[in-house]
Amino acid sequence: MHLPKTFLVCTGFAWLIHTGSAAAPSSTALPFQSGEKLTYRISWSNIVEAGTAELSVGPDEGKPNSLRLQAKAFTVPSVAASYPFKDEFVSHFDTVARAPWLYEENFTERKRIVRDRTVFNQSRGTALFTNSKNQSKQLAIGLGTQDPVSSLYALRSLVGLSPGMQVTFPVVDRGIQYAFEARVVAAELITIKLGSFNTYRVEVSVRRNSAPMPDRSISAWISTDARRLPVLVSVSLPVGAALIELVGATP
């Protein structure tokens, strides 16, 4: 399983609220700005350290009112010999529409090298996926469809995140459409090495073609403050769980 990618895909949420009214993106300033950098420790069952990850926000000159959202992950030297990975994912995010217009994946896992891109046309309801072999596939999408990286940032910009909220939303990843179902189940105080955080615990399940994917169960803890930081994520695996823990945040 691609741990960093799973983390980014499955901690995203938006945009159809089942609590009686539709969720709307915040009309106020985004809780993240250009210059933000979050760093994470990736481990297996909180015992074996497997890698590190970084989320960063930067300016995007490709389109007005856009940010460049980047996710990177690397294997630590102790496990690089058995399972090396080096990943980079970039979402070009329209801050007005709160949705991506371009998504790029560049990652290496063992001998597998992937260079993919997805171009979103949100107003026309289409997404064009092109893989490493320059093979293309066009999909019909709903307005507000996210990519794995943008979904996490779109969650952070939602209004009214609180226990009891239930969310279903579309995500396109490598030419495949998924439905993510999420429940904000509780407000919890959690303590990690970086400190103690008041958080919302969110349980996420994944569906493809209306069928559940039981191996894609995720729990995420999102801070309750104005920044809505992803503090901790647990991803179920066939044996144990992958834990992604925040170890640094700037500014």
Image: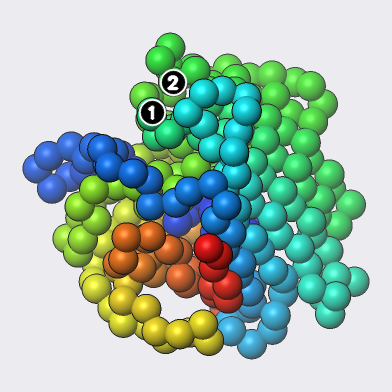
Q: Quadrant of residue 22?
A: top left
Q: What residue is drawn where x is 47% and y is 28%?
A: 65
Residue occupying the point 51% across, 31% down = 66
Mark 2: secondary structure: loop
Above or below: residue 109 compared with residue 144: below
Count of residue discs:
2
Residue 47: x and y in percent read: 64, 87
Q: Quadrant of the N terminus?
A: bottom right
Q: Which residue is mark 2?
A: 122
Q: Which mark is residue 97?
A: 1
Q: Is residue 26 left or right of residue 228?
A: left
User: Which of the 4 quarters of the picture holds residue 29?
Assistant: top left
Q: Earlier in the sequence, mark 1 or mark 2?
A: 1
Q: Tag 1: Cα neighbours inside 10 Å, few (<14), some, or many (≥20)? A: some
Name the residue located 81 percent from the left edge and 51 percent from the top edge. Answer: 108
Horizontal and vertical percent for residue 98?
40, 34
Q: Position of residue 150 (x, y in %)?
A: 49, 42
Judged from the image, the secondary structure of the residue bearing numbered disc 1 is loop
- Does 156 sit above or below residue 139? below
Would you identify the image quadrant in which residue 135 lies? top right
Residue shown at 38%/29% (left/top)?
96
Mark 1 or 2, closer to the camera = 1
State whether residue 56 appears in this view: yes
Q: Amino acid at mark 2?
A: Gln
